[in-house]
Amino acid sequence: MNRDIRKMPIISSKHPGALVWADAFYFRDLIREDLSINLKTPEKVFKLACIADVLDFPDYGLELLTHLTLQYGKDEKYNFADNIIESLAYVPGLLKQGELLASLPVIEKIRVYSSSYKYKNFSIEEDLRKQAYQYLLLGEYDQAGSIYEKAIEFEPNVKANYWHLGLLLLLQDQELEAHTAWFLGIAEGKPEEIDIWIAELVEVLQAEAERREIIGDKALALTIHENINNIVSQYNE
C-alpha cells in the first residue's frame, strides 16, 4: 500500500512510521478509492484488519474497522463502534488534560453506530446498562448517571447499577453521593448477601482504577483505591 494513514489517534509502538513501504510488510490497501469493487468486500476488509492487528499495526487496523463500521455498520457483524470506543478508552496518552474521548474525530464519525445512540429509545435493562457504560467511557458522566438511575427504576434488585452509579458520582468528585448510592444497593441485605455485594462493588471499582492507571490518570486511580479501602474497612468491622 502507498497511502499515508497517519490520520488515526494511535500509532504502533513497534512500527511508528507511516505504512508506506517496508522490507517485510506488504498490504494491499482494500479501502483505496481506485481499487476494484470486487476486492472491497467487508469479509476481506475485516480479515485485513485482523492481520494488521496481529502484526501490530493498530492504526491501520483502527482505520479498517472504522471503514467497516461506516460502510456496513447497519449489519451488527460489521459494526465495531463499541469495540473502537472500548479499545481507545484504554490507550495511554491519547487524551489531553480535560479532553473527552467523545471529542476524538474518529469517535465522532462512528458514534451514531454505538450503543450510546442505538439504544436511545430502548427500555430494555441490558441495553440501558450497555448504553450507560459507553457514556462512561466517553467521559459523558451526566448522561451515564441518568441512564443508571433509570435502570435502577426498572430493576431495583440489579445491584450492578448502584455500583456504577456510585462510581460515576465518584468520578465527578461527589464522594458522599457515591457512598450513598452504594449504601442504597447494600441496605437491608443479609450478612452473606452483603459480603457478595461488597465483592462485586470492589470488582467494579478495581476495574476502573486499573483503567485509570493504564491511561495515566494516577490521581483518580488513587482516589478510587482509597474508596475501596474505606469500603472494605467499613464492612469488615
Image (tube, grey):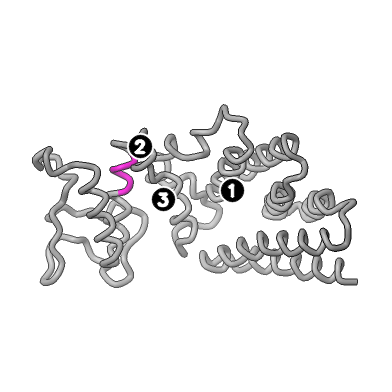
Relative to 100, 109 lies left or right:
left
Query: Tag 1: Cα neighbours inside 10 Å, few (<14), some, or many (≥20)?
Result: many
Q: Secondary structure at mark 1?
A: helix
Helix, strand or loop: magenta stretch: helix
Q: Secondary structure at mark 2?
A: loop
80 over 56 or under it: above or below: above
**Figure quadrant of residue 50:** bottom left
Q: Which residue is mark 1?
A: 136
Q: Which residue is mark 3?
A: 84
Q: Are marks 2 and 1 in contact (CB under 8 Å)?
A: no
161 over 56 or under it: above or below: above
Relative to 94, 236 lies left or right:
right
**Marks 2 and 1, how far apart in space?**
22 Å
Q: Which mark is residue 117?
A: none
Magenta segment range?
65-69
Residue plotted at (15% across, 58% down): 27
208 over 162 or under it: above or below: below
Quadrant in which the C terminus is drawn: bottom right
Instruction: Name the amino acid, label 1.
Output: Leu
Relative to 176, 115 lies left or right:
left
**Marks 3 and 2, how far apart in space?**
13 Å
Query: Tag 2: Cα neighbours inside 10 Å, few (<14), some, or many (≥20)?
Result: many
**Figure quadrant of residue 190:** bottom right
Query: Tag 3: Cα neighbours inside 10 Å, few (<14), some, or many (≥20)?
Result: some
Image coords of residue 163 (percent x, y): 72, 53
Q: Which residue is mark 2?
A: 73
**Figure quadrant of residue 175:** bottom right
Instruction: Name the amino acid, label 3.
Output: Ile
Image coords of residue 44 (percent x, y): 20, 48
